[in-house]
Amino acid sequence: MNLLKLYYLIYFKKIKPFDLSKFILKKIENSLFKNYFINIDYNYIKKQCLYSEKLLLKNKNNLLTGIPTSYKDVFSTKSLKTTSGSRILNNYKAFYNTTFLNKLNNLGVINIGKNNMDEFCVGSNTFNFYFGKTDNSLNKNLTAGGSSGGSVYLVSKNLLPFSIGSDTGGSVRQPSLFNNVIGFKPTYGLISRYGMFSYSSSMDTVGIFSKSILNISIVLNAISGFDVKDQTTFNLIKEDYTRYLNKNWLLNKVCFKKLKGLNVGVSKDFFNNIYHFSVRSNIENVLLNFEFLGAKIIFIYILFFDFLITIYNIISSSELYSNILKYNNKFLFDKNFFSLKKKNFYNTLSINTKNKFFIGNYLISTNKNKKFFFFSKKIRTLILENFKKNFLICDIIVSPTTPCNIWNTLNFNLNKNLIDKYTSISNLTGLPSINIPSKILNFENFKIFQGFQITGNYFSEARLIQIVYEYKKFFL
């Protein structure tokens, strides 16, 4: 769904924000049993529609006024419950909004609901035992991906122009691959995380789903920027992320090959960790497409590539333990679930969250075990420096999004620790990364979507958006 088309319809009064939201809600009524949403409040939607219509009457509207969207249930909202996908927070209501959500509310964006997710963002299936399992948008037997699997459904069905999730180890890019949309993870610190429930504080990033890279650039213009409440944000000059669209990579030269002069980095290690041949052939085709557009392929070396997933698991598990521990004895007063016997707090967690929790507990419980955490932090610094050197010789790095194709939620035989092998790179380093759909494999009864991942240098979002825009123009 094109955001600009909706803007013109609303601006020229061919459709009202209330009617647009009503149309989308009617479309999703039949799919509510599929567990894509955790919270929907119709009265709250009406209030937002009235506010956006007031902005239109006063001529204070913008590109996002009256546009409906949805958010992952990991972001704090005053008017809706915020559960983070956990039954522990089933009745928790925040007393403040997330910073980026306030920005969108002030612009007149309409939040139609909070999306389903894996508990505390831990998981790759959106297989939520309390709020229900989320199915893939095209095939109920396949996984929707995780942990932001609920946020991608309406975007995939062309009912919403964009939705917002969170990315800690690939939670935006992996479900976007499985549902054939673009998943965008910006540089760490570009968007404020204030009001977001933390999984791994040093890696959590706000991400955007959309089928159009132009939609993503418009939303990024609205929600990025410095926030006094979040010390991880950077105080940079405000950018326009649409400024390079419809321009050549080398602005001083006019040529047919739109990406001439672009250096694309590829590591040989990427091809040694792929499970399926179709994923390898897809990446080879993508590299040929970049060469057709005038780009140059450069082979690079990634330090400690085989240990990246181990380092990611050590750091994320340790930080998850620290973040979840604060909920103990804090929200255990829900008499509808907890009996007077005061059941153990840890028994209420899902299997994936519990495993990560106890691994983190082991890693930082004693001084003897803390050495693994601190050693991983040191290696993470070396990896970061290695990527800085790589970006001196290349502009972007192309890699698979996952080492395998989409899987059945009931038959998950792959090594879960290796699924995030490619996506966790940009989370460890804080680099911006985008998943781009490339082609569809047709089988007898279902389709399998394939895509690839582009990783850029720090704060190079405008250039990444330009590359994706030019690539999609020719090949998608």
Image (cartoon, grey):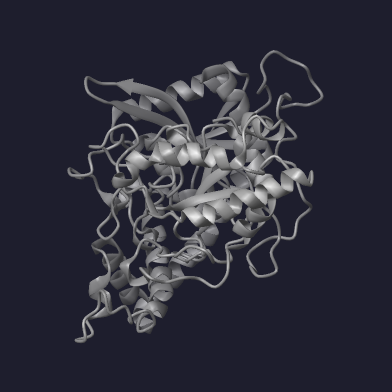
* Image position, residue 408 (x, y; %): 22, 39
* Farthest-out residue, bottom: 341
Q: Is residue 79 above or below residue 456?
A: below
Relative image position of residue 447 (x, y in whole percent)? 30, 25
Quick check: 385 left or right of 26? right
Q: Residue 89 vs residue 408: left or right?
A: right
Q: Give the residue at x 46% y 46%.
A: 172
Q: Nearer the viewer, residue 295 or 318?
A: 318
Q: Residue at x 31, y 67 (%)?
A: 87
Q: Residue furthest right?
A: 252
The answer to whether residue 268 is above or below residue 317 is above
Q: Residue at x 50, y 24 (%)?
A: 287
**Does any portion of residue 256 appear in the rendered image?**
yes
Closer-to-camera residue (225/312):
225
Answer with the quarter of the image where residue 9 lies.
top right
Q: Position of residue 154 (x, y in %)?
A: 44, 39
Which residue, as the protein is rendered here, is positioned at the far top?
Answer: 256
